Image (cartoon, rainbow, N blue to C red):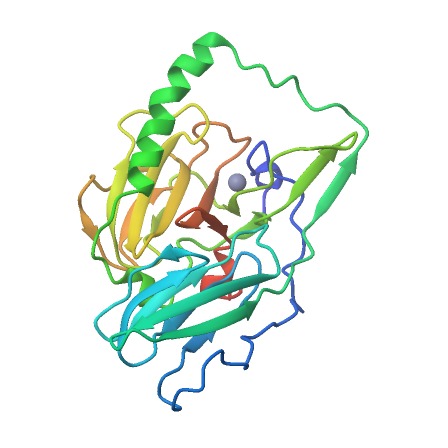
Amino acid sequence: MTGRFKTALCLLTLSAAAIPAAVAYAGVDDTEQSAFREAVKFGFTGQAIQGGVMIGDAPAGTRSLSFDGKAIPFDEDGKFIIAFNRDAGQAAQLVATLDNGQTVKKFINIAPRKWHIEHVNINRKAGTASESFKRRRAPELAQINAARSAMNDSAGWRQTFVWPVKGRISGMFGNQRIYNGDPGSYHSGIDIAAPTGTYYVAPADGVVTLAASSPFTLEGNLVMIDHGMGLNSAFLHSSEILVKEGQHVKRGEPIGRVGSTGSATGPHLHWSMKWNAARIDPILLTGPME
Ligand SMILES: [Zn+2]
């Protein structure tokens, strides 16, 4: 490990906290809200935990599904995905409406995480962005939002995710700094330090929804992948992008090369993931790096 990688992290990133080894597991409440036969119930894999993802099986005969009051899609075989924001509250509710009009409800208890929070006795930088920055930023945000709202029929969301690149983790998801009591934004992804030019791959199948033609102000050369069902990945600071918008990519296929474009102090890959509006922790999809 060379010295330069010690600083390979986003400007918003804090020191890497240890992987939450003993994240409390909170499963799904066994109490069904209905007295239906055994087959008419939800099944799940994954953890109900802040920043986590669960793959579910809808009860037999499900016609529509909602999560905290919002309709969510499911596949022909009844499989669906839900995820929990970094700051998700303690409980969520799934409701399946069956063909016969009856409903099956499931309450989910969401385990809290202990985020790495650092209190510092300095003031946050004045938050007034210059007019020229705002002018450049607006179209970038519009592109990012358009990419996130893209809906492709990719089945990547059903796969086990792989690490896009391996290296020292220089910033964990969720880290946050509090400046004299004023909370800064938390780190929205995971940072993996690697030399400039290192290839990184798609962690799961998907469709490229954004391949920046020129570096974004903060993200640098940005790639975004839609894994289907509202789940997407963003890869920041690339030195080179190897894919085009609309391209279908397979898990393990190279999509870019690590760099330090945009707001970065050294070469690394910042990988962030969202499911709809929820920001989620990639490490909970891949498991620890081996
Ligand atoms: Zn980062």
Residue furthest front in the image = 101
Which residue is rendered at x = 35% and y = 42% of the image? 257
Whole-percent x and y of residue 7? 61, 36
- Whether residue 278 can be seen here: yes
Q: Is residue 37 above or below residue 254?
A: below
Corner quadrant of residue 101: bottom left
Camera-side residue of 184 and 76: 76
Which residue is rendered at x = 52% and y = 43% of the image? 188
Whole-percent x and y of residue 72? 33, 59
Which residue is rendered at x = 26% and y = 42% of the image? 209
- Whether residue 161 can be seen here: no
Which residue is rendered at x = 65% and y = 60% of the image? 112
Whole-percent x and y of residue 218? 46, 27
Residue furthest top in the image = 131
Q: Is residue 146 above or below residue 93?
A: above
Q: Is residue 217 left or right of residue 27?
A: left
Q: Is residue 216 left or right of residue 73?
A: right
Q: Is residue 54 above or below residue 35?
A: above
Camera-side residue of 187 and 236: 187
Camera-side residue of 57 and 135: 57
